[in-house]
């Protein structure tokens, strides 16, 4: 007889594994559990604060946010999926950005699981964004340019995708794998596997990590600019966006200790990331408009409007790329780069 795994059973199994593993870790390392996330997050930091405390406070804040958003996502509250996805991204980016404090080997599995969760959340979010994008563009067109049942065609295209992605997300949130991820995150906060560098002053450790993320972003954007317009360049710009996002979140984590200079850097990298995010959405919308247009044509409908939407999306993508390059010019100014080493 097969026993069905309920959310309660899955969570209990995951929590039980977490307790056992945490006890084993303490026996092996001889370390007492670290302070709870709220205790760390409530502290005020300075440039002389321990670098590890600053980073773990940020991790604790994002972990708490992930937990708080869980019931809202289950209830399908507005913007909850997007916010939970951002929390997962912030956690993963921080673990990636600070290997001098949290070794890659110690966080490899958790980073992979956060990526998995982010992808599931992203499937829901991406369908919402693309549907809204196309419907908004349709609403902005003159009536004479909207031929055939274009709005109904867009809704019919995305409704089953949104429903399927939503169902898959709820299955994930009720799975043992998800509860194990949460338990693993709790273990990380209770007993951080930090290095000796974690005890050093924040201003000696954190700017170096931020500097690495900045140089990675710079390298990505230079690579993208060397590629001719097309799919290859679009992919390279998407990779640039990921690098800018990591730089932004690395600086965001350090900001409570490093202050105003880091805040300026965070804002500039956010501008780059946001423009490239809009570029990515426009690129995907262009492909979606073309796909829906082909289906409309095969159904005997006039596909003119979707061709128009495809071209509008291409124009939007070009404008967003130009905006991102302008944002990068501001981000690489010397006064902005004072936060990095």
Image: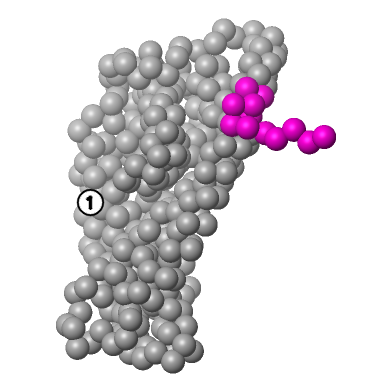
Residue drawn where x is 68% and y is 16% of the image: 20
The quadrant where residue 210 appears: top left
Position of the N terminus by quadrant? top right
Give the residue drawn at x 38%, y 17%. Answer: 38
The way the protein has been coloured in the rendering is one colour
Front residue of this view, candidates 65 and 268: 65
Magenta segment range? 1-14
Q: Is residue 25 left or right of residue 50?
A: right
Using the image, determine if residue 64 lies above or below residue 157. above
Asked if residue 279 lies left or right of residue 12, the reply is: left
**Residue 4 counted in the magenta span:** yes
Q: How many marks?
A: 1
Please identify the residue farthest to the right as the structure is shown.
Answer: 1
Q: Where is residue 341 shown, x and y percent of the image?
A: 36, 39
Q: 218 and 83: which one is in front?
A: 83
Is 264 included in the stretch rendered in magenta? no
Residue located at (64% from left, 8% from top): 30
Q: According to the image, label 1 marks what residue?
A: 333
Q: Position of residue 87 (x, y in %)?
A: 40, 38
* Residue 110 percent coordinates (x, y): 58, 35
Q: Looking at the picture, does residue 206 appear above or below residue 146?
A: above
Secondary structure beneath dot 1 equals: loop
Q: Tell me which residue sits at (50%, 55%) in the image.
A: 165
Residue 243 visible, this angle: yes
């Amino acid at each position: 007889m097969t026993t069905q795994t309920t959310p309660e059973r899955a969570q209990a199994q995951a929590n039980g594994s977490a307790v056992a593993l945490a006890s084993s870790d303490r026996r092996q390392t001889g370390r007492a559990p670290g302070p709870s996330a709220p205790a760390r997050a409530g502290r005020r930091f300075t440039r002389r604060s321990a670098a590890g405390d600053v980073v773990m406070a940020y991790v604790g804040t994002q972990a708490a946010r992930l937990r708080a958003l869980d019931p809202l996502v289950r209830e399908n509250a507005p913007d909850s999926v997007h916010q939970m996805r951002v929390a997962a991204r912030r956690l993963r980016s921080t673990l990636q950005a600070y290997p001098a404090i949290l070794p890659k080997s110690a966080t490899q599995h958790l980073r992979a699981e956060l990526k998995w969760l982010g992808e599931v959340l992203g499937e829901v979010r991406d369908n919402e964004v693309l549907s809204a994008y196309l419907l908004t563009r349709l609403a902005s067109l003159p009536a004479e340019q909207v031929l055939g049942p274009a709005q109904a065609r867009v809704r019919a295209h995305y409704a089953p995708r949104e429903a399927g992605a939503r169902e898959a997300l709820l299955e994930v949130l009720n799975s043992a794998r998800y509860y194990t991820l949460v338990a693993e995150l709790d273990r990380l906060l209770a007993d951080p596997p930090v290095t000796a560098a974690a005890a050093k002053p924040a201003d000696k450790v954190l700017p170096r990590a931020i500097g690495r993320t900045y140089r990675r972003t710079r390298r990505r954007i230079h690579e993208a600019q060397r590629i001719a317009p097309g799919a290859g360049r679009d992919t390279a710009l998407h990779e640039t966006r990921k690098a800018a996002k990591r730089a932004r979140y690395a600086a965001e984590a350090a900001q409570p200790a490093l202050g105003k200079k880091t805040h300026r850097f965070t804002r500039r990298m956010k501008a780059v990331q946001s423009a490239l995010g809009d570029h990515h959405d426009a690129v995907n919308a262009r492909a979606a408009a073309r796909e829906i247009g082909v289906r409309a044509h095969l159904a005997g409908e006039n596909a003119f409007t979707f061709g128009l939407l495809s071209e509008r999306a291409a124009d939007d993508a070009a404008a967003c790329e130009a905006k991102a390059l302008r944002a990068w010019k501001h981000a690489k100014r010397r006064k902005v780069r004072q936060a990095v080493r």
